[in-house]
Image (cartoon, grey):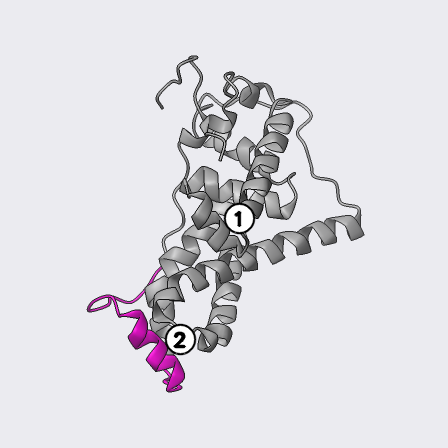
Amino acid sequence: MAPTAHGNVALAEAPRESPPKVARKPQPGAQTNEHLLSLVRAGDEAAASALHGQFAPLVNKLVWRVLGPDSEHADIVHDAFIRIYRGVGTVREASRLPDWIAQVAVNTVRNELRRRKLRRFIAWEATPEADNPSYSPDLEGLELVRRVYQVLEQLPVTERVVLSVRLFEASSIEQIATLCDCSTRTAKRRLQSARLRFERIAGRDPLLRARLPKAGAILGGHKS
């Protein structure tokens, strides 16, 4: 990782695990969005398989970026594609298909996060914390990423989604607004709130606090 001007490493540059590979059948070539929608409208049995083959990498990546390593990753991706296939017939413009699918994926993750928060509240389940946190020699690798996701889990769902996309996808405000189906003004407000909350919580962790920028730039990014 490259050091910042103050000798710190920006969290956005931390090495991270790669999303699990999504097995898919070899395709002779990427199908056009127009062709995919025509299969859906015609009720073609190949439509579901074609949609999955074309957009599985996108959905898989977005779920991974927001949740990180997760035992229910495959189930959430599956749920997202169920929602995609049920609603794809409402997409009128082929050029909008990728953005629409990304929105469905993000909404599926957001709903899952809300269900998890509700389950923990009902069951009075406290998030387990190690009594004596151990520091792995690979502090700038998997351990750092694990702790970043631990902080993200403490953010409100809407803030976690926008900050995860910004951190791990380096998306623009316009892209974040599209993914979250909100205005750019709302996206900016949520992102700024998420950055401040993240910095406050991360400051309690010695490992993360040492890597927080000191020049007013939160998480190595700029104010948008």
Q: Inspect the image, locate mark 2, and give the three-letter code of the amino acid beneath it.
A: Ala
Whether residue 46 is visible: no
CA–CA distance between discs 2 and 1?
25 Å
Mark 1 lies on a secondary structure that is loop
Left or right of 16? Residue 26 is left
The residue labelled by disc 2 is: 48
At a point 62% along the width and 52% down the height, the residue shown is: 113
Residue stretch in magenta: 23-46
Which of labels 2 and 1 is toward the front? 2
Question: Does residue 151 sit above or below 75 in this rendering?
Answer: above
Q: Nearer the viewer, residue 162 or 202?
A: 162
State the residue at coordinates (47%, 69%). 84
Residue 37 lies, in percent from the top left, at 36, 76
Image point 33% across, 73% down: which residue? 50
Q: Main secondary structure of the magenta part?
A: loop
Q: Is residue 26 visible?
A: yes
- Other-residue count near label 2 (Cα within 10 Å), few / some / many at <14 / 14–19 / ≥20: some
Magenta-drawn stretch contains 141: no
Q: Hey, which residue is sitting farthest left in the picture?
A: 28
Q: Residue 70 carries which label?
A: 1
